[in-house]
Image: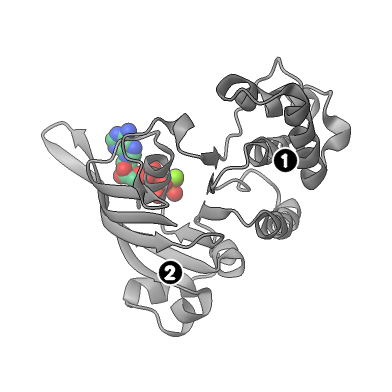
Amino acid sequence: ELTLDHVTKRFADGGGDIVAVDDVSADIDDGEFIVLVGPSGCGKSTTLRMIAGLESVTEGTITLDDQAINDRQPADRDIAMVFQSYALYPHMTVRENMSFGLEESTDMPDDEIDERVESAAGMMGIDRLLDRKPGELSGGQQQRVALGRAIVRDPAVFLMDEPLSNLDAKLRSQMRTELQRIQEDLGVTTVYVTHDQTEAMTMGDRIAILDDGRLQQVATPLEAYHEPANQFVAGFIGEPS
Ligand code: ATP
Ligand code: MG
């Protein structure tokens, strides 16, 4: 279980402070796919970055399986994050991109790493691309490699920040279905950030709606649609994407 307990993030900004995330509390169940939605600047990426350990927490506690992880280094959190810009290493092959993290941060034997890379590549449908370099791949293929690289680590939690937003509409809807299937197969707890209502409504077991750093509602898509907690949620859910 991943828990945010009164989590706040303030950024110093000249005289005043920006409150990017304002007293957010949420419990995310094991194996759950939760979608964090809200308008640009509402604090989605900052929330994910705090969970990943890429950003410090100003106030509050983040716990994973009842252990506070606020002070743990990103590599010690058992959490993998996938970004919109996938940041593959251009000079490495796909195989090397996928195995690099495990080689660096674990003492896992090479043959086990190979096995994991091949199984993740199979899941993402990129097994025939393992010897290519990122520059020889399409954008969609690169995104698959980035997702495969996260799967290889077999983390307790997946964090995804608009992972499909660089893809065209057709590929995006195909990847949505695939991602859901893989997430279900792996049973990995997933926090998925998007500002796309369709993605939120179709992918999430539950959706968490954020506005101006504040959590407005955490509910199943149907509950949020039929029983919005307030005007903001009603307007946001109702808007065409
Ligand atoms: P988008 O949908 O555009 O990606 P977001 O919901 O991910 O937006 P965040 O990136 O979390 O929003 O930003 C939340 C707020 O915090 C914004 O007002 C942003 O300007 C501010 N912010 C984010 N990072 C920093 C930083 N390093 N320093 C100062 N302010 C920041
Ligand atoms: Mg963002």
Tell me the tag on residue 32.
none
Residue 58 rendering spot, x and y as whole percentages: 22, 41
Task: Give the quarter of the figure containing the N terminus.
Answer: bottom left
Tell me the tag on residue 144.
1
Q: Residues within 10 Å of mark 1 (few under 14, many from 20)?
A: many
Point out the frontmost of discs 2 and 1. 1
Q: In the image, what residue occupies the spot 74% across and 22% down?
A: 110
Residue 112 rendering spot, x and y as whole percentages: 74, 30
Say which quarter of the image contains residue 11.
Answer: top left
- Front one among 74 and 240: 74
Q: Which amino acid does label 1 sit on?
A: Arg
Q: Which amino acid does label 2 sit on?
A: Phe
Residue picked out by circle 2: 236
Name above or below for residue 72 compared with residue 194: above
Name above or below for residue 21 compared with residue 208: above
Q: How crowded is mark 2: few (under 14 residues within 10 Å), some or many (20 or more)?
A: some
Per the model, the C-alpha gap separating discs 2 and 1 is 30 Å
| Residue lying furthest right | 128
Q: Can residue 88 be seen in this view?
A: no
| Residue lying furthest top | 91
Q: In the image, what residue occupies the spot 28% across and 40% down?
A: 57
- 143 on left or right of 217: right
Task: Give the quarter of the figure containing the C terminus.
Answer: bottom right
